[in-house]
Image: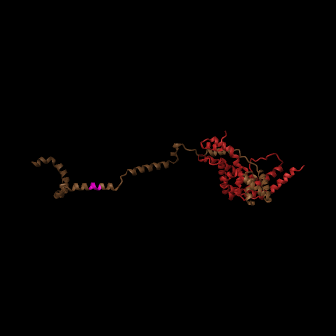
Chain colours: A red, B brown
Amino acid sequence: MARTDVQVMLDVKAGDDASFDFLLQKYRSPLVNFLNRMVRDSATAEDLAQEVFLRVYRARKQYTPSAKFTTWLFRIATNVALNSVRDTRHQKMEVSLDAPMDDGDLAPRELPAREMRIDEHMVERARTEIIRRAIWSLPEKQRAAVLLHKYEEMDYIEIGKILDCSEGALKSLLFRAYETLRVQLSPLVSQSAAHRAGEGRPS
Amino acid sequence: MKCEDAGNKLMAYMDRRANPAERNEVDEHLAGCAACRTRLAEFREIWNVLDEVPAVEPSFGFDARVRQRVAAQPQPRRWFGWLGIEPRLAFAAVLLIALTVWVAKMPTSNPGTTATAVAIQQEDFNAIKDLGVLENFDVLTKFDSLSVASASAAPQQEKSQPDEPTAND
């Protein structure tokens, strides 16, 4: 019978380094992706993901399974990300959808899902960049809520525990966030509709 | 239900995480509100658009860097390792214990002890006071001069001892 993550973490607490390695393998991608979407810069995201694993290791002796392991893990990750965003806020330029795109910010190991023409690839990258900027333009707590809700597919109770807010407050927070995204990404929605309509047409 | 209340429940309705009671409420509202139906359709579009952001993979050296940082962490000490944590603290504790023991062994000046000491002094005084020699004033007045005289005469007596038989003669 497979161990739950809580049991694995308890093994880490008991001094089993192989169990820590297991958690590292399992959660490195979700954490790097979450942090990459939170802090905009992929190098910083990797540094922060390492910091999260280091904090998990340091806290192993004090670990008590009072919640799901992912709740504990992403609560650490969210705190690390929010601290980083607040510390570097003064260094960052204000995010604008009109600002020129910066290819250097793109994640280094990102690959297109399928083979496509260069112009298609460029269009897709441009769309992706617009979506990223729209997410980054959200206030930090709304951004974290959307990322945990949309990409980590967590339930409302778990996200509420991570962000330290009630279920009702979280739903309101999410509504405001998706409302902002709905307005900012509406041009992409109409492009998608036109694209789908074009695909449906006989050639 | 107002549009604002429905709005807060639209995401849970859309991602199917709303409970049956909430779904019924939203269904009833949507049946009579074209604006919220449009908003829901747009939320669905946005939900799909957000899927276009591709996932990234950690760089190749990620695991190694984490392991390196973990290995650099101080290891937990063994049961006897506490002495090594703060030698100065241990020394200070020993010093404090020694000082406490020393202070505890010192004679204390409580009222009972003082009364005993006064009683002993009084007893000694009474014993001296009752001595008959103290009533002989002459002995007392001559005592000092006798002792001085005997002290100065002693060396002479030592010197004159060989001549004693002659003097007696």
In depth, the one of B99 and B4 nearer the eye is: B4
Task: Please give left or right for residue A145 compared with residue A201 in the image.
Answer: left
Is residue A160 in sight in this rendering? Answer: yes
In depth, the one of A121 and A67 nearer the eye is: A67
Is the N terminus of chain B in the top left, top right, bottom left or bottom right quadrant? Answer: bottom right
Q: Which residue does the image show at 65% across and 51% down from the upper left? A: A75
Predominant secondary structure, magenta span? helix
Is residue A134 in sight in this rendering? Answer: no
Check the image and name the residue furthest to the right.
A203
Task: Please give left or right for residue B128 compared with residue B10 in the image.
Answer: left
Image location (x, y in percent) of residue A27: 68, 46
Which residue range is magenta in the image? B117-121
Image location (x, y in percent) of residue B35: 79, 59
Image location (x, y in percent) of residue A69: 65, 47
Is residue A182 highlighted in magenta?
Answer: no
In depth, the one of A132 and B40 nearer the eye is: B40
